[in-house]
Image (cartoon, rainbow, N blue to C red):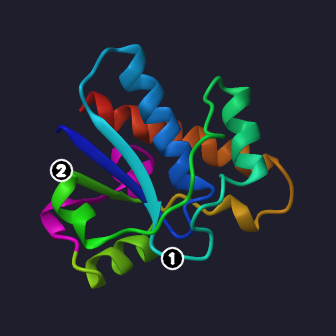
Amino acid sequence: MKSILFVCLGNICRSPLAHGIAQDYVDKNGLDIKIDSCGTGSWHVGETPCENSIKVGNLHGVDISKQRARQITQKDFEEFDVVIGLDDSNISNLLKLGCPQSKLKKLGFYGYENQDTPDPYFFDGFDGFEKVYEMIEVCTLNLLKS
């Protein structure tokens, strides 16, 4: 596995956190794995991750503030060895967009019994971001160690 792409809906909450956690692990362990993230939608292209995702990342020593949201492209399906959707809706959208099923996995497959990673953007308050961060961290580290 030489490249991993994390994908959620808008690329401002969940996938930037997975991207940041994975990049931090890769950097600290001297691994040669390309890490990136994007969204299936275009609403937030060019924006930084949402404030609470940046905050929860910082609380755990992971800086995602320099990331910018982007939308997935067909080239991504060729360029990345593994495409990780954060929930069933993302998986469905990725398949409709032409992602080869052989490259596609759900993040929850690597822990949390294949559960969806909930979108904290719609949660009321910060606690949801902390819970989602913990889930993303466990699954992302399990993915990288597998």
Q: Residue furthest front?
A: 46
- Asked if disc 1 and disc 2 are in contact, CB closer than 8 Å, the reply is no
Q: Residue furthest bottom?
A: 96
Relative to 42, 75 lies left or right? left
Q: Nearer the viewer, residue 69 or 143?
A: 69
Callout 2 secondary element: loop
Q: How far from the left and from the top, in percent, is residue 138?
A: 48, 35
Q: How far from the left and from the top, in percent, is residue 48?
A: 66, 53
- Residue placed under numbered mark 1 in the picture: 41
In this view of the protein, can residue 86 be seen by the observer? Answer: no
Callout 1 secondary element: loop
Q: How far from the left and from the top, in percent, is residue 46?
A: 59, 61
Q: Is residue 55 magenta?
A: no
The amino acid type of the residue labelled 1 equals Gly
Residue at the spot 63% in from the left edge and 63% down from the top edge: 119
- Residue placed under numbered mark 2 in the picture: 81
Residue at the spot 17% in from the left edge and 69% down from the top edge: 101
Q: Nearer the viewer, residue 98 or 115?
A: 98
Q: Is residue 102 magenta?
A: yes
Q: Is residue 96 above or below residue 102?
A: below
Relative to 93, 14 lies left or right? right
Earlier along the polypeptide chain: callout 1 or callout 2? Answer: 1
Per the rendered image, the range of residues in magenta is 99-115
Q: Determine which quarter of the picture holds residue 32.
A: top left
Q: Nearer the viewer, residue 105 or 72?
A: 72
- Circle 2 packing at 10 Å, graded few (<14), some (14-19), many (20+), is some
The amino acid type of the residue labelled 2 equals Asp
Residue at the spot 69% in from the left edge and 47% down from the top edge: 53
